[in-house]
Image: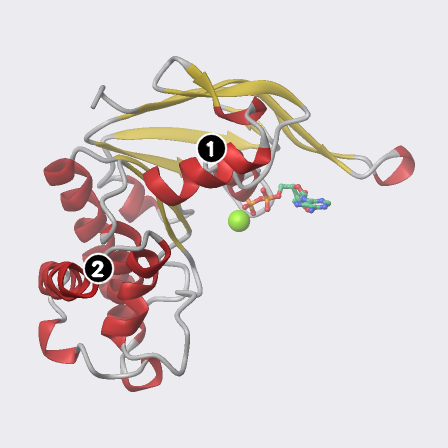
Amino acid sequence: MTTSRLTGVDLTRDFGSGETLVHALTGVSLEVAAGRLTAVTGPSGSGKTTLLNLLGGLDRPTSGRVLLDDTRVLSELPEAEVLAVRRRRIGYVFQTFGLIPVLSAAENVEVPLRLAQVEPKERSRRVAEALERVGLARHAHQRPHELSGGQQQRVGIARAVVAGPDILIADEPTGQLDSDTAATIMDLIVELAHERGLAAVVSTHDPALVARADHVVRLLDGARL
Ligand code: ADP
Ligand code: MG
C-alpha cells in the first residue's frame, strides 16, 4: 500500500444560512501524515469537530478539498465510495466511547470485523489480539457498564483499529476522562500511530495532551493560528 496521507486544502464549512449563517471553518489547510499523531487543538467552538468530520468523510466542505493519498478527492467521492473508504481505511474513536451497552468488550470490538465479513475464527483471533494490545485481555467478557471510563475508551480504541485501518480519527477521546487516565489514553493512541503507521488525528483542548503529539494544528474561530 502507498503511504497513507490525509490532506485538507483550504477547507471551509458554513452551517445554516442568512441570519443563522455560521462560519465553522474558514480556509484551513493541513497534512496528516502516516505514522504520526496530529493534534487539533483550540477552545470550544473553534472548529475541531467540524474539521475532523471533514477529514473522516463524515461531512463535506462548503469549499476546499480533502485528499486521500494525494490522489483521491475524498470530499468529492460519491457517498457509496466514501462509505467504502470509511469502512476499509478509517477507524474512529469517540468522546463518549460509543460502545453498545448489551455487548461485551470483545463483542464490541468484533463489530467492524462482522461488517467486513471476516470469518469467525479470524474474528476471534483479531479481537483477542486487539484487546491484548490495549491491555484488556482479562476484561473481554465484561460489558461497558462494568468497566471504568478509561477501560471503555480502550475498548473503543481496540474497536477502531481491529480491522486494520490506516487512518485514525479521534474527536476529544479523553474529554470524559480524568487527567491521568487521559494521558495514558493519549499515549496509547500515539504508540498505535507509530507502530502501525497510522495517519492519526486527535482533537483535544488539553495542553498536556497536545504536548504528546508529533504535530499540532491550532484553531481559533475556525481558522489556523
Ligand atoms: P469544537 O469542536 O472546536 O468545539 P465545532 O466544530 O463543534 O467546534 O463548532 C464550530 C462552530 O460551528 C461553532 O460555532 C458551532 O456552534 C458551529 N456548528 C458546528 N456544527 C454545527 C451545525 N451542525 N449547525 C450549526 N452550527 C454548527
Ligand atoms: Mg468538538
Q: Secondary structure at mark 1?
A: helix
Vertical position of residue 190 compared to residue 14: above or below: below
The residue that appears at 24% across and 84% down in the rendered structure is 142
* 15 or 116, nearer to the observer: 116
Query: Which amino acid is tagged 2?
Result: Glu
The residue that appears at 31% across and 55% down in the rendered structure is 117
Image quadrant where residue 59 sits: top right
The residue that appears at 33% across and 44% down in the rendered structure is 207
* 153 or 183, nearer to the observer: 153
Q: Is residue 26 visible?
A: yes
Whole-percent x, y for residue 12 in the image: 63, 24
Q: Secondary structure at mark 2?
A: loop
Answer few, some or many: residues within 10 Å of disc 1's Cα (few below 14, many 20 plus, some between 14 and 19). many
Whole-percent x, y for residue 57 in the image: 50, 36
Return the residue at label 2.
119
**Lateral position of residue 69 relative to residue 34, left or right:** right
* 216 or 7, nearer to the observer: 7
